[in-house]
Every structure is written in C-alpha cells, then in structure tokens.
Amino acid sequence: MEINSLFDVKGKVVLVTGGARGIGRMISEGFVANGARVYIASRDASACAKTAAELTAQGPGTCAAIPTDLLQLAECERLAAELKKRESRLDVLVNNSGAAWGAPVDTFPDAQWARIVTLNMQRAFTMTQLLLPLLEAKDSKEGKDEEGERTPAAVINIGSINALAVPATLENYSYTASKAGLHHLTRHLSQVLGPRGVTVNTLACGPFDTKMTAFTFKNFRAAIEEGNPMRRHGRAGDVAGACIFLASRAGSYVNGATINIDGGVHLAAKM
C-alpha cells in the first residue's frame, strides 16, 4: 500500500473534453505531469494543437489533440471512432466541456437552453455511451491491485457548486440546471456502470479563474476570495489532484460521489 503506487496514473490513457483551456487544461496538465497518455478534444483546433504541443514538451507523459465540436453528435461519434483507432482501452474519461450563459429571467433566450443543456449534460452521457467499449476493455497485464483486482476505469464529470446552491450574482439558469442534471446523471450511471468495471463521479467545482469566469472575476474577485473559507480561488493542483485520485487505485472504491472542489464555499451562509 505504498503511496506512489496508490496514486500512480503513469501509462493510463485519458480523454479530457474541453482539455485545451481552463479547468480542462489544468486536468490535462496534471495527468501529463504524472506520465499519462492524454487526449484533448474541443472545438478550437488551434488551441488544442497549442496545448497538446506545450504539455507534451513538458512531459513526461504525452498529449495529443483531436479537435471536436461536441455540440454535434456526428462529431462525438467521429471522436470516439478516432480514439478507438489509436487505443485499445480508455482508463479515464473526463467530461469537462461546458458553456454558460447569463441573462435576466424575462429575456433569457430559448436557444441557450438547448445549447447549454446539450453540451453540459447530454454530451457527458453521449461520450460515456460511445466510449463504453474502451472503458470496459480489460488488460490482464495492467492495472491490478494487491488483491489481483483490476483498477476500474473512471468517468469523471466536471460539475459545479452552482448545482448545489443558487448563485448570488448570476442569472445563469440553463447552466445551473444542466449541472444539477449532470450531478444526478453521475449517480444514476454509477449504479449501472459500477458492475461493469467503471466508476462514475462528479467534481463540483467552485470558483476557478478561467476564460469562462473572466467576467465574474473581473467584477467580483475580492468578494469571491474573501467570501471563501480558504480565502482564495481554485488552483490547478486542486482539480488535477482530485482527478488523479479518482483515476488511481486510491480512488477505485469511490463511485457515485459528488466531491466539492470549492474550499467549502457552498456551505457558507448567505444571511
């Protein structure tokens, strides 16, 4: 039960959707830094290529880009087919791709419900479904624990504390609803896929300084950090470390959980 083997992800095959920027890049970098073979997929081909090259140069793992517009089902199918050409198994699927939209309740656009719910929730199901053959693939030479059991594959859905509590400053209705749905989808899938050798868990992420949260941080940085019990926002190691835990032997008995990566701010009283 030596610590390095407990948390070892060296040689694991990992797909991170939305892995070129923000939280997705933080996660990708963490896996590459620990020797994993990482694939990233997002709509911006140039950003994907740039991130893949930078992370591979850092090593010791590798990062390859498969640009994909995950809003389109055909593109998701193409991504799954391409990964199946390159790999015989998938150890970790991180469903991170997401988007947000804010507008007053009186004028919130209907189109943004379909777009946000599809990308934030439905595509987590789509990619898990399409990649099940790779997630279930067995390798007799790899991933055994001390009792001879294969470490399960891991699906990690990137949720949000906005699914746990109503945000105080934003009218992001489709985002909060889609993330709440994603959290419950995780619980449902965990019961179905656990017996098939795949764990499914959610990370409910709090405030991280990314492109998606740029407006919020520009206007409310002090309030965000002062209102957090840890007096700071999330850092790369916080979310990457949680993913590595869930992907490793150390996290192999965690299934159907929602792990809050937020410094405890979701528990803070608002009055």
Image (cartoon, helix red, strand yellow):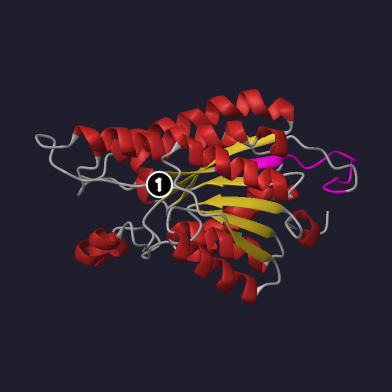
**Magenta residue check for 267:** no
The residue at 71%/42% (across/down) is 252
Q: Main secondary structure of the magenta part?
A: loop
The residue lying furthest to the left in this view is 106
Side of 265 where 104 appears, left or right: left
| Other-residue count near label 1 (Cα within 10 Å), few / some / many at <14 / 14–19 / ≥20 | many
Residue drawn at the location 36% of the way across and 56% of the way down: 207
Residue 37, by quadrant, is bottom right
Circle 1: element type:
loop
Q: Position of residue 142 (x, y in %)?
A: 85, 49
Task: Give the side of residue 150 with respect to residue 234, left or right.
Answer: right
Q: Is residue 164 visible?
A: no
Instruction: Identify which residue is drawn at 47% across, 29% down.
Output: 184
**Does 71 sit left or right of 103 as displayed?**
right
Image location of residue 94, percent across then percent down? 56, 47
| Residue carrying label 1 | 98
Closest to the observer: 140 or 144?
140
Viewer-closest of 100 and 250: 100
Disc 1 marks a residue whose amino acid type is Gly
Q: In the rendered view, would you say 73 is above or below 97?
A: above
Counting the numbered discs, the total is 1
Name the image quarter holding the C terminus. top left
Q: Give the residues drawn in magenta, as a range.
A: 142-156
Name the quadrant containing residue 106. top left
Residue closer to the observer: 16 or 80: 80
Q: Position of residue 132 (x, y in %)?
A: 66, 33
